[in-house]
Image (cartoon, helix red, strand yellow):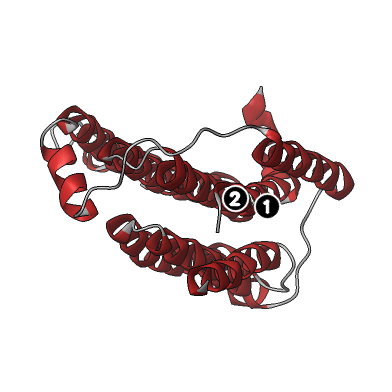
Amino acid sequence: MLTGIVFWVLAVVAVAAGVAVFRVDSMARATYALAASFIAVGLVLLLVDLEFLGVITVLMMTMEMAVMGIYMIMFMGMNPALMPMSMVHGKRPALAVSLGTFVVLAAGALLVPWPTRRGAPAAGLVTSLGEAIMESKMLVMMTVSPVLFATIVAALVLALPRGRYDRLGDDLKGTALRGGSRR
Amino acid sequence: MTLQTMLLVAAALFSVGLYGAISQQVVVMVMMGLELMLNGVILAAAAFWWFLSPTPDGQVLLLVVITAMTVEMAMGFAVATLLHRSRQSDMTDMATDLAQ
């Protein structure tokens, strides 16, 4: 009973905050609204005993939204980030598409005869996750690691204005670009 | 709290995110729409895991989804930075030629 009430409160907060992301006046507020939505979903994960994933969702998204807020103020300037804004295109078609998607997904959720639960959750779910990651699903983690590393490299390549080779030449001594060609 | 109700909430989150991803003009706001969609995916995956098959495999899958979200954010910020540097703009309408 109590779990149900908590779930519905969190569900309303998650969806309302999600709607607020695109309704509030400033991007800074939108960032906090998205963080609230993620925190509500992270707490719902705790309700279904996903302790580890719920906690990392809350922690990670709080930090991520803080970074996002900085990006917005950085790109938009202080005033546009904190002042009223409405920068949308194709509002009505977007609304129609999203409403149609919701109807289809909701119909699927309610009408599909879902099977009953198979198996029971392990006694220690966090321990079982750790064991899965380090034993049977080790390949997943071994794949995730280079993907994350490649993301760091690719993001830096995209975001850096110019690297050391651009500035200093192939020999990194600055001789190749001396004489006026340096940007 | 049932599978159906959790999936309904997840569908609502996904749809709201879809609206944002389609309608917003600022790149970072588009990313926020995508994040909201992934928020719905996480909730739906958690519901499937808990109500259908609560095995460790499902938790690993959720972990991968959360990782994908992190990767999307990092690359999105990098692209937004590049776009801002090269065009002095953070609007998707100013970057429509990227589709060509």
Q: Position of A101 compared to A136: left or right?
A: right
Q: Mark 2 and 1 residues: CB-CB less than 8 Å, in contact?
A: yes
In the displayed structure image, the side of residue B19 where residue A92 appears, left or right: right
| Residue A33 in sight in this render | yes
Dot 2 amino acid type: Ala
Pick whichever, A12 or A113, lies toward us. Answer: A113
Point out which mark residue B12 bears: 1
Q: Position of residue B13 (x, y in %)?
A: 63, 53
Residue A53 in picture, x, y percent from top left: 33, 55
**Which SS class for mark 1?**
helix
Query: Would you name the residue on which mark 2 appears?
Result: B10
Q: What is the x, y in percent for residue A151? A: 32, 39
The residue shown at (55%, 45%) is B83
Q: Residues within 10 Å of mark 1 (few under 14, many from 20)?
A: many
Quarter of the picture holding the C terminus of chain A: top left
- Placement of A30 over or under B34, stated as above or below: below
x%, y% of residue A9? Answer: 59, 73
Instruction: Look at label 1 and name its amino acid.
Output: Ala
Against B29, is A2 above or below?
Answer: below
Viewer-nearest residue: A33 or B43: B43
